[in-house]
Image: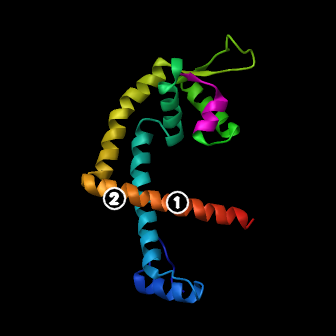
Amino acid sequence: MDNFTFIDRPDNQRLKMMTDAYSAKDSTFDSVVSELFIDFQWTYRNMQKAYDAALDRHDLSESRFIILMFLKTAANHELLPSIISEKLGATRATVSKLLKALESKGWIVKHSSTTDKRAVPVRLTESGNAILENFLPVNFEVVHSLFENLTREEIKQFSHLLDKIKEGTRKCTTKLEMEK
C-alpha cells in the first residue's frame, strides 16, 4: 500500500480509486473535492506555519496575541478571566494557564476589583502593550503577504466561498454531534 504524506500527496487518479472504493454508492462525492480539500488543508497548514513563525519571533502564540488584543481594546485595558475565556472560546483552565504565562512575562497584571471582592480582572501592562505595538505592523505585513496575489474581486469571491465552507463545517459538526 502507498504511504501517503503531505509531501507525497495523492494525485486525482489515486483519489478517484479511493473515492470509488469507499464512498457511498449513491454519493455525488467526487475525487476532485478530495483533492481540493487536501490542497486547502496543505495551504492552510503552510500559511499557519508562516504566521506562527512571525508570532514566535515576538514570543507570542496565537492565543497570547488574541488575549492581548482583547485587553488592548477593552475598557481600561482590563477584563475578567471568565470574559476572556468566553471570547476566546476556551476553557477557564486553558485561559488560566495562558494568563499565568502572560503574567510571568509581565505583560498583564491581576488586581482586585473595587466593586466585587471575588473578581480578579487582568489588565494589560505597558510591557504587554509594547509587545503588541511591536508585533502589529509585522502581523499586518504577514497577512498582506499571504493574500497579496489576490485581487480585490478575488478576495470578495474567496470570502464568499469561505462562508460556504463555514456553513458546510457547521453542518458536518452538527451531524457528527448527533451521531454521538
Q: Quadrant of the C terminus?
A: bottom right
Q: Position of residue 176 (x, y in %)?
A: 67, 65
Range of residues picked out in magenta = 78-87
Residue nearer the viewer, 146 or 155: 155
Residue topped by disc 1: 167
- On the question of residue 180 being in view, the answer is yes
Residue nearer the viewer, 14 or 172: 172
Q: How is the image coloured?
A: rainbow
What residue lies at 52% left-to-right and 26% top-to-bottom? 71
Inspect the image, locate mark 2, and give the three-letter code of the amino acid beneath it: Gln
Q: Position of residue 170 (x, y in %)?
A: 58, 59
Q: Quadrant of the N terminus?
A: bottom right
Q: Are marks 2 and 1 in contact (CB under 8 Å)?
A: no
Q: Secondary structure at mark 2?
A: helix
Residue 42 falls in image quadrant: bottom left
Residue 132 falls in image quadrant: top left
- Work out which residue is located at the far top of the displayed protein and give it: 114
Disc assigned to residue 157: 2
Residue nearer the viewer, 63 or 154: 154
Q: Position of residue 179 (x, y in %)?
A: 72, 68
